[in-house]
Image: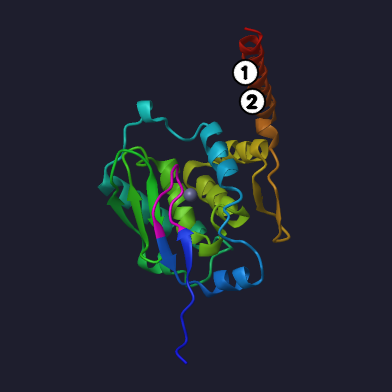
Amino acid sequence: MEKRVKSWRVALEPCGDSGLIGRVPNPRLVKWVTEGRNMTRDKQRSRLYRAERQCGLQVEKSKLEPMTIGECQKFVNKVLERKAVKDIKHLGKFHPVLNQGILVEAGKGGGYATYRYGRRIISLGVWARQPFILLHEIAHHLAPSYVNHGPEFASIFLKLTRQVLGKEAEEKLLASYALNGVQVIGKNGKPRKARCPKSQKAWLEETKWLIQSRKNLERGLVEVSNDE
Ligand SMILES: [Zn+2]
């Protein structure tokens, strides 16, 4: 009897909206599925997006001076050439992205980014043409394909941020992870909740307070409208 190659549908990108849907044969993913773990659920995605929005490293649409596609390609190439990036411990020695690179292309529309594992491509809408979003997309290519926005992804994204944007940026992102309960991979190799670095504790408290105040205000407004 003819053997069928198993494949699984995965959402290709993320950053923002639905993105494309593709079929990526992936034996490890199939293994996870047969073990009864629902890997199609991208559990941490909304937390991670929120953390990105709140950390202050993402430039808003109205303030962005987008890089050109050529500049984005150079940026991606440079990141992949860094020794520290090659050493990220989650990566296999012969990670195809590091050997063959990632092609950057213009995406349709003004908005988000999409990535395609099998083809090593990042498609960029206008808003996505900024370093922080590019690092997010590169992290997708470097992380194992089945992890989506899980702890492995979050850790790799954090390391890229440190390598390219510096320690302060890394600490901002880490604090925002902590605020949103994003999980990373701990030193023992297991997932754990991110912890806020000392330098960002004041920011964390202030942001928590602001979020709570906004919630209270919204609640207050709802009560007023109920009274009418
Ligand atoms: Zn993503």
What residue type is disc 2 on?
Thr
Q: Which residue, given by chain and number where applicable, does mark 2 sit on?
A: 207
User: Which of the 4 image quadrants contains residue 156?
Assistant: bottom right
Q: Which residue, given by chain and number where applicable, does mark 1 sit on?
A: 218
Q: Is residue 98 visible?
A: no
Q: Which residues are magenta?
A: 11-21
Q: Answer few, some or many: residues within 10 Å of disc 2's Cα (few below 14, many 20 plus, some between 14 and 19).
A: some
Q: Residue furthest bottom?
A: 1
What residue type is disc 1 on?
Glu
Location of residue 13 in the rendering, given as x and y in whole percent from the top left corner: 43, 52
State whether the magenta stretch is mostly helix, strand or loop.
loop
* Whether residue 182 is situated above or below residue 203 in the rendered picture: below
* Whether residue 188 is situated above or below residue 169 in the rendered picture: below
Location of residue 123 in the rendering, given as x and y in whole percent from the top left corner: 33, 51
* Whether residue 85 is situated above or below residue 164 in the rendered picture: below
Q: Please say whether residue 132 is one of the residues in the magenta stretch.
A: no
Q: How is the image coloured?
A: rainbow
